[in-house]
Image (cartoon, helix red, strand yellow):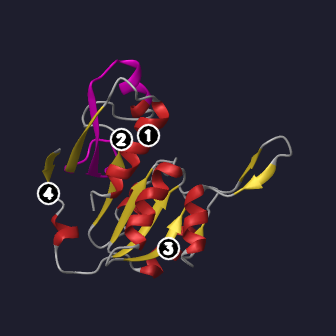
C-alpha cells in the first residue's frame, strides 16, 4: 500500500543522469530497476571487492556484478571522505541525482551536495521508525506487523532528510529476515 509519493523528480518527463551508490543484493534490485528505466546510470559506486569463503577469494559486491553486466562504469573507492580524486570524477560526470541504497558508508557533505538536484536514499523502514542500521532485523525482532520502504533525501544527519515516498509492507508470520529483505528490496526498486 502506498503511504505517499512526492518524488516528482522521477515522475517528470525528464531523463535523469544518475550516479548509483550501493553494495549488497538489496541495492542490486534498485540498480536493475534504474538500468531498465528511462534514466541513464552514468556510473556505479560500490564497496571494494572483499575476500570470501574458505579460500578468501576476492568477491565483487552484487551491485558491481549487475553494473558490469550492463556495461556501466564502476568505481570502488577505499574511502569517500576527503577523497579528492573521487570528488573530481563525480563532478566531471555532472550528475542530476545520486541514488544511494545500502552503500555502507556515510557520504560527506561535499559529496551529498554535488548533484544538480538531490542525493536520495532508499531505506528499509517506514521512517522515522528504525532509522540507522539493521531496520529489517529490528522490525522482525520487535514483532512488528508491518514495515516498509521509503525514499528520502540524504542530509548530514543520518536518516533525517525529507521523506518523498513510502510503501508499506505487511510482515507475515512466515516472514523471516531473508524473506522480508527480499520483499523490501523489490518494493524499494519500484519506488522510482
| Residue 117 against residue 51 in the figure, above or below | below
Label 1 residue SS:
helix
Query: Residue 7 lies in magenta, yes or no?
Result: no
Residue range highlighted in magenta = 137-164
Query: Which residue is disc 1 drawn over?
Result: 181
As measured in the structure, the alpha-carbon distance from the residue carrying label 4 to the one carrying label 2 is: 18 Å
Identify the residue at the far front of this view: 174
- Left or right of 24, for residue 192: left
* Sequence-wise first label, 4 or 3: 4
Residue in the picture at 38% in, 61% down? 99
Query: Which residue is disc 3 drawn over?
Result: 43
* Sequence-wise first label, 1 or 3: 3
* Sequence-wise first label, 1 or 4: 4
Query: Which residue is disc 4 drawn over?
Result: 6
The image shows residue 34 at horizontal and vertical percentages of 38, 68
Identify the residue at the far right of this view: 55
Quick check: marks 1 and 2 in contact, CB under 8 Å?
yes
Query: Which residue is disc 2 drawn over?
Result: 124
Which of label 1 and label 4 is nearer to you? 1
As measured in the structure, the alpha-carbon distance from the residue carrying label 3 to the one carrying label 2 is: 23 Å
The image shows residue 166 at horizontal and vertical percentages of 21, 46
As measured in the structure, the alpha-carbon distance from the residue carrying label 1 to the one carrying label 4 is: 24 Å
The image shows residue 33 at horizontal and vertical percentages of 38, 65
Which of label 3 and label 2 is nearer to you? 2
Amino acid at each position: 500500500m502506498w503511504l505517499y509519493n512526492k518524488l516528482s523528480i522521477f515522475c517528470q518527463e525528464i531523463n535523469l543522469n544518475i550516479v548509483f551508490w550501493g553494495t549488497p543484493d538489496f541495492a542490486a534490485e534498485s540498480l536493475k530497476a534504474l538500468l531498465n528505466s528511462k534514466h541513464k546510470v552514468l556510473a556505479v559506486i560500490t564497496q571494494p571487492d572483499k575476500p570470501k569463503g574458505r579460500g578468501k577469494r576476492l568477491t565483487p559486491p552484487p551491485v558491481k556484478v549487475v553494473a558490469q553486466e550492463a556495461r556501466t562504469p564502476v568505481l570502488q573507492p577505499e574511502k569517500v571522505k576527503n577523497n579528492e580524486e573521487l570528488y573530481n570524477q563525480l563532478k566531471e560526470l555532472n550528475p542530476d541525482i545520486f541514488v544511494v541504497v545500502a552503500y555502507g558508508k556515510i557520504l560527506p557533505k561535499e559529496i551529498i551536495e554535488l548533484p544538480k538536484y538531490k542525493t536520495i536514499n532508499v531505506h528499509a523502514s517506514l521512517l522515522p521508525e528504525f532509522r540507522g542500521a539493521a531496520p529489517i532485523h529490528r522490525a522482525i525482532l520487535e514483532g512488528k506487523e508491518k514495515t516498509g520502504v521509503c525514499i528520502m533525501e540524504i542530509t548530514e544527519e543520518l536518516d533525517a532528510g525529507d521523506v518523498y515516498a513510502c510503501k508499506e509492507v505487511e510482515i507475515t508470520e512466515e516472514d523471516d529476515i531473508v524473506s522480508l529483505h527480499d520483499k523490501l528490496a523489490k518494493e524499494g526498486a519500484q519506488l522510482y
